[in-house]
Amino acid sequence: SQQGEEDPQALSIQEGENATMNCSYKTSINNLQWYRQNSGRGLVHLILIRSNEREKHSGRLRVTLDTSKKSSSLLITASRAADTASYFCATDALNNNDMRFGAGTRLTVKP
Amino acid sequence: DAGITQSPRHKVTETGTPVTLRCHQTENHRYMYWYRQDPGHGLRLIHYSYGVKDTDKGEVSDGYSVSRSKTEDFLLTLESATSSQTSVYFCAIRGLFYEQYFGPGTRLTVT
């Protein structure tokens, strides 16, 4: 079963706007990760946030984690057409060996 | 792609035939993974390996076997392919901080 569930399933915005995607999960985790996938390609790691962290930044990306609500959000600021992709959250089991991915959010950024 | 290759990249096979997919890495990572990606399901873990000859089952392991006789190669075998195994298969390795790096994928069609 999926551990992470992204919301919304699809998001369409204009270039320059911010995009926010959410992820909810079910069990305790060590860390949560966000990945990006362009059509027909493999996933690319974006950012990892540990269970004892609440917020993390990387360039135009901001990730938050609320372990009490078992949820995370990914914010992409000042979006670009090149940000068009699917975004997945992934959580690990406490043994760190087994990652569970959500079904993803399909982001479309219109120029 | 962190030195990860997959072969073949595309394959069409008939129901009941055996199929082996290969994942090759050049960076001596200990952990390697096989996932399948289907619409609406995100990525689901099939099997993973934590060292030469050390493997374990993932979420959807039925109908699949794996082998790892060398650090750099992780093989996924479908002993008798079925139409439900039509999917895109991704190999991944685990980096130092539990992030995963993915190969380009293999599109398998079972007719």
Image (cartoon, rainbow, N blue to C red):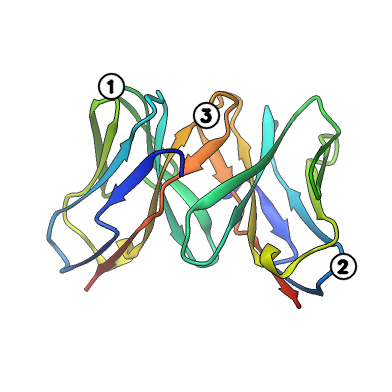
Q: Quadrant of residue A106?
A: bottom right
> For numbered disc 3, what is the local secondary structure?
loop
Q: Please, what is the three-letter code of the amino acid marked with disc 2?
A: Glu
Picture layout, residue A76 above or below residue B32: below
> For numbered disc 1, what is the local secondary structure?
loop
Q: Which residue is mark 2?
A: A17
The chain that hosts pointer 3 is: B
Q: Please, what is the three-letter code of the amino acid marked with disc 1?
A: Val
Q: Do the residues at discs 3 and 1 belong to one chain?
A: yes
Mark drawn on residue B95: 3
Q: Nearer the viewer, mark 3 or mark 1?
A: 3
Measuring from the top left, give residue A109's x and y in whole percent: 74, 72
Q: Which residue is mark 1?
A: B52
Tell me if mark 3 has few (under 14), some (14-19) or many (20+) residues whose alpha carbon lies within 10 angstroms of its own. Answer: some
Verify CB contact (< 8 Å) between mark 3 and mark 2: no
- Report the Cα–Cα distance between label 3 and label 2: 33 Å
- Left or right: residue B10 versus residue B33 is left
